[in-house]
Image (cartoon, helix red, strand yellow):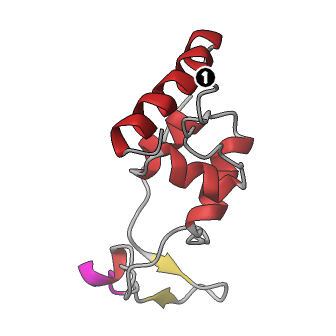
Amino acid sequence: MSISAISGNLTSASGQAVAPLPSPAPAETETPKQASVQPGHDTVKLSGAALARSLKQQGQNVAQIALAMHLDANSVNSYLGVATKPAATAAPKAPSPAEEAKEPATEKATEAIAGKG
């Protein structure tokens, strides 16, 4: 097998010599740079509620979402529409039977001191 060299002389179909094309300038061979910086894909900025719902659908729990969004768990719950229980308030304590027995004696003593007895 033989390889022949390629000459730099070009000829047209009619046999006349054709002048070679000038080599392109170096700037033309470089890939053009983008004039403005744009992401390679479409992007959407989500609201807090939409982001929380999206993360929840991806399987994250409230604590993970709160950490990712730099929020507290109550804020994430409000974004997700989760009703949180209000803080437990102390219900009035019902008097014990012993306290009920003391109460009339205390009232009598108070009335005696006040001079009503």
* The magenta stretch spans residue 67: no
Q: Residue at x 59, y 68 (%)?
A: 46
Report the span colored magenta. 22-27
- Residue 12's place in the image compared with 83, above or below, is below
**Judging from the image, what secondary structure is the residue with disc 1 in?**
loop
In the picture, measured across the screen, residue 22 lies left or right of residue 54, that is left
Amino acid on which the number 1 mark rests in the picture: Pro
Q: Residue at x 59, y 85 (%)?
A: 12
Mark 1: few/some/many CA within 10 Å (<14, 14-19, 20+):
few
Mainly helix, strand or loop, the magenta region?
loop
Identify which residue, 18 or 67, lies in the foreground: 67
Identify which residue, 35 or 37, lies in the foreground: 37
Would you name the residue on which mark 1 appears?
95
Where residue 24 appears, x then y in whole percent?
33, 83
- Residue 9's place in the image compared with 68, above or below, is below
Identify which residue, 32 or 74, lies in the foreground: 74
Where residue 21 appears, x then y in whole percent?
40, 86
* The magenta stretch spans residue 23: yes
